[in-house]
C-alpha cells in the first residue's frame, strides 16, 4: 500500500465538503491493527463549532463552511463516524519523567484515518477528548474547552513560525461538563499530524510484538516519514529520526519554546511538535525556566531540552537494535551494532549545534555579516545569551529590538539593562561584524525571522479563561496575531509586550487532562 510518493504535478483538490465526503485512507488500521483498539468515539450531547481552521481544511480538500454545518460538526464531535474512516485508539508505552510505563495509549483519542493534502502528503486526522478507550486508566476520556483551544493557539503559532507541528482542524463544544478541579465546559479537538507515531509507540512494539511485527512497524515508520532510507536499514532509520529531532530542537531553542513534558510518548517519529499541554514560551531568557506544574525536579527545563531529546532518541535506538542484530548470540556483531548506533546518537549533538547556530546567526543578522567568522559568531551569540540571562531580558522582544539597534536606535536594548557597560561592549563587537554590509537590508532580514508576536503566556491564559466563560473574542484576536507573527501592525501593541510585572514568577501550566 502506497504511503508516500506525493504527486507534485497533481492540481489542488477542490473542496469536498465534510469529513463524510473525504477520500479516507486507513493504512494504520490496515497494517497495524494489532497496535491499538478498534472502537468508535462516544457521542456528545450538544455539539457546536468553536473553531474551524479554514486554511487547513482547504489544504485537506475540505469545505470549512460544510465543517461548521450540523452534519460536519457531528463528524468533528465523534457523533457520526465519517464514511470510510476506521476509528481506533492507538497503543503506546513511554518513559514519563524517566520512569517507564509499559502501557499508556490513547486514553481519550481516536484516530479516524488519513487524508492526503493538496500536495499529496498523508496526514493523520484524530479526535481528542472523544471518549473513553481501553487505555483510559480510569480517566473520563473527555477534554475541556481551554486545553483544546490552547492546542489551536500553540500549533498555529508554531506553524506560522515555520516549525514542524501538529495542527488543529477544529474544536467542537460538547454541551457537556467535565469535572476537573472545577466543572468545566467540554470540547473535542480534531488534530492533524504527519502521524501520531511516537518513540513510545516503538517501545510498546519492542516489548509486546513478535520480531516480524517489529519489522513491520519499522517499515511503516520508514515508508511514512523517511522513505529515503533503504528498506531494512534500521541504523539509517535511526539517523533520520535523530536528524529530524535535532532540527526541531534547534527551532524550539531559538524561539524560546518550552514543551514542558518531553516524555518519550510525546516525541513524534516524524519530527513534528506534538502535545501542547503544559507548554509555554519564555519571557525572560532563562535556561532554568520551568513552567509545568508536574515537572517539580526541572527535568524538562528550557535549557535541558536538547539533552532530553538525545536521551529519548537513545530509547528509540533500543527498539531498533533487535532488528539490526538478528543473532543476539554473536557478541562481536552485537558490539559492532551498539557502537554504530552510539555514533548515530552522538551525531545528534553536531546536527543540533549546526542547526541551532544557523538559526541564531539569522536571528542576530550574522548570516549577513561582512565576513564569515564562525568562532566570532558563536562567541557573540553565547555572550548575548549570558547578558540576557543576567538581566532577565525578554527573549522574543530582545531579538526583535536588535533590528532596530541596527537601524540606528542604539539605545533600544541598552535602556533595558543594568549592566550598561557590558551591553555596550557586546553591542560594539556585534555592530563591527557588519563592516560595510547594507545594515538596512540586514535588519529587514532579521525582522523576517524574529517574531513580534508569540502566544505570550498571560495572553493565552486570558484568552482561555474568557473562552471557558463563553467569550471567544480574546482567543480569536490572539490567534489572528500569532498567525501573522513577523509584521508589526497598529493596534496589536499589547500582543508584543512582555507580561505584566510579577506574572511570570510562580506561573504554572497544566497538562489539561
Image (tube, rainbow, N blue to C red):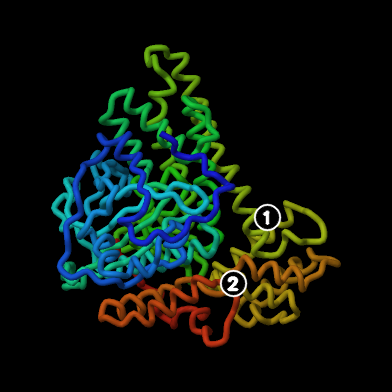
Dot 1, how many residues are within 10 Å of its Cα: few (below 14), some (14-19), or many (20+)?
Answer: some
Q: Which quarter of the figure is the N terminus placed in?
A: top left
Indicate which disc, 2 or 1, sits on the residue closer to the N terminus.
1
- To which residue does mark 1 refer? 378
In the foreground, 496 or 109:
109
Q: Residue at x 54, y 56 (%)?
A: 251
Left or right: residue 513 versus residue 290 is left
Q: Which numbered tag is attached to residue 404?
A: none
- To which residue does mark 2 refer? 486
In the foreground, 258 or 438:
438
Q: CA distance from mark 2 to mark 1?
A: 25 Å
Looking at this rendering, what residue extends furthest in the right direction?
Answer: 436
Up-down: is 107 above or below 52?
above
Q: Which mark's residue is nearer the viewer, 2 or 1?
A: 2
Q: Position of residue 464 (x, y in %)?
A: 33, 75
Q: Tag 2, which secondary structure?
A: loop
In the foreground, 97 or 422:
97
Q: Position of residue 252 (x, y in %)?
A: 51, 57
Q: Which quarter of the figure is the C terminus placed in?
A: bottom left
Q: Position of residue 462 (x, y in %)?
A: 36, 79
One can see residue 231 in this view: yes
In the foreground, 208 or 13:
13
Q: Position of residue 419 (x, y in %)?
A: 63, 75
Amino acid at each position: 500500500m502506497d504511503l508516500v510518493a506525493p504527486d507534485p504535478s497533481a492540481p489542488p483538490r477542490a473542496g469536498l465538503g465534510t469529513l463524510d465526503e473525504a477520500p479516507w485512507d486507513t493504512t494504520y488500521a490496515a497494517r497495524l491493527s494489532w497496535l491499538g483498539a478498534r472502537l468508535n468515539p462516544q457521542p456528545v450531547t450538544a455539539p457546536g463549532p468553536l473553531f474551524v481552521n479554514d486554511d487547513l481544511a482547504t489544504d485537506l480538500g475540505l469545505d470549512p463552511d460544510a465543517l461548521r454545518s450540523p452534519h460536519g460538526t457531528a463528524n468533528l464531535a465523534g457523533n457520526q463516524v465519517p464514511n470510510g474512516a476506521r476509528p481506533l485508539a492507538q497503543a503506546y508505552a513511554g518513559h514519563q519523567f524517566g520512569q517507564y510505563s509499559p502501557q499508556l495509549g490513547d486514553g481519550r483519542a481516536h484516530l479516524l484515518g488519513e487524508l492526503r493534502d493538496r500536495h499529496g502528503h498523508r496526514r493523520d486526522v484524530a479526535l481528542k477528548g472523544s471518549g473513553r478507550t481501553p487505555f483510559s486508566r480510569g480517566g473520563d476520556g473527555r477534554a475541556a474547552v481551554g486545553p483544546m483551544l490552547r492546542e489551536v493557539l500553540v500549533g498555529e503559532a508554531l506553524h506560522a513560525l515555520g516549525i514542524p507541528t501538529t495542527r488543529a482542524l477544529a474544536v467542537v463544544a460538547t454541551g457537556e461538563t467535565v469535572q476537573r478541579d472545577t466543572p468545566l465546559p467540554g470540547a473535542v479537538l480534531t488534530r492533524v499530524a504527519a502521524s501520531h507515531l511516537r518513540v513510545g509507540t516503538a517501545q510498546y512494539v519492542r516489548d509486546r510484538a513478535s520480531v516480524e511485527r517489529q519489522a513491520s512497524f519499522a517499515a511503516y515508520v520508514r515508508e511514512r516519514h523517511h522513505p529515503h532510507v533503504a528498506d531494512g536499514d534500521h541504523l539509517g532509520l535511526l539517523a533520520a529520526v535523530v536528524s529530524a529531532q535535532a532540527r526541531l530542537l534547534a527551532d524550539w531553542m531559538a524561539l524560546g519554546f518550552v514543551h514542558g513534558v518531553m516524555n518519550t510518548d510525546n516525541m513524534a517519529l516524524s519530527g513534528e511538535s506534538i502535545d501542547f499541554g503544559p507548554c509555554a514560551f519564555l519571557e525572560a531568557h532563562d535556561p532554568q525556566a520551568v513552567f509545568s506544574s508536574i515537572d517539580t525536579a526541572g527535568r524538562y527545563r528550557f535549557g535541558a531540552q536538547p539533552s532530553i531529546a538525545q536521551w529519548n532518541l537513545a530509547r528509540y535506538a533500543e527498539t531498533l537494535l533487535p532488528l539490526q542484530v538478528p543473532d543476539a548470540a554473536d557478541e562481536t556483531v552485537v558490539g559492532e551494532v551498539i557502537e554504530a548506533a552510539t555514533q548515530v546518537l552522538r551525531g545528534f549533538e553536531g546536527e543540533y549545534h549546526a542547526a541551532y547556530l544557523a538559526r541564531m546567526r539569522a536571528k542576530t543578522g550574522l548570516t549577513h555579516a561582512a565576513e564569515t567568522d564562525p568562532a566570532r559568531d558563536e562567541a557573540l551569540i553565547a555572550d548575548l545569551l549570558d547578558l540576557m540571562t543576567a538581566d532577565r531580558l525578554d527573549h522574543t522582544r530582545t531579538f526583535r529590538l536588535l533590528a532596530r539597534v541596527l537601524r540606528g536606535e542604539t539605545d533600544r536594548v541598552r535602556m533595558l539593562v543594568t549592566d550598561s557597560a557590558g551591553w555596550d561592549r557586546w553591542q560594539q563587537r556585534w555592530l563591527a561584524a557588519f563592516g560595510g554590509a547594507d545594515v538596512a537590508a540586514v535588519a529587514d532580514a532579521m525582522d523576517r525571522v524574529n517574531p513580534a508576536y508569540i502566544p505570550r503566556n498571560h495572553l493565552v491564559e486570558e484568552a482561555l479563561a474568557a473562552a471557558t466563560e463563553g467569550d471567544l473574542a480574546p482567543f480569536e484576536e490572539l490567534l489572528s496575531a500569532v498567525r501573522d507573527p513577523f509584521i508589526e501592525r497598529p493596534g496589536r501593541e499589547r500582543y508584543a509586550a512582555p507580561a505584566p510585572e510579577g506574572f511570570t514568577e510562580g506561573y504554572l501550566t497544566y497538562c489539561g487532562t
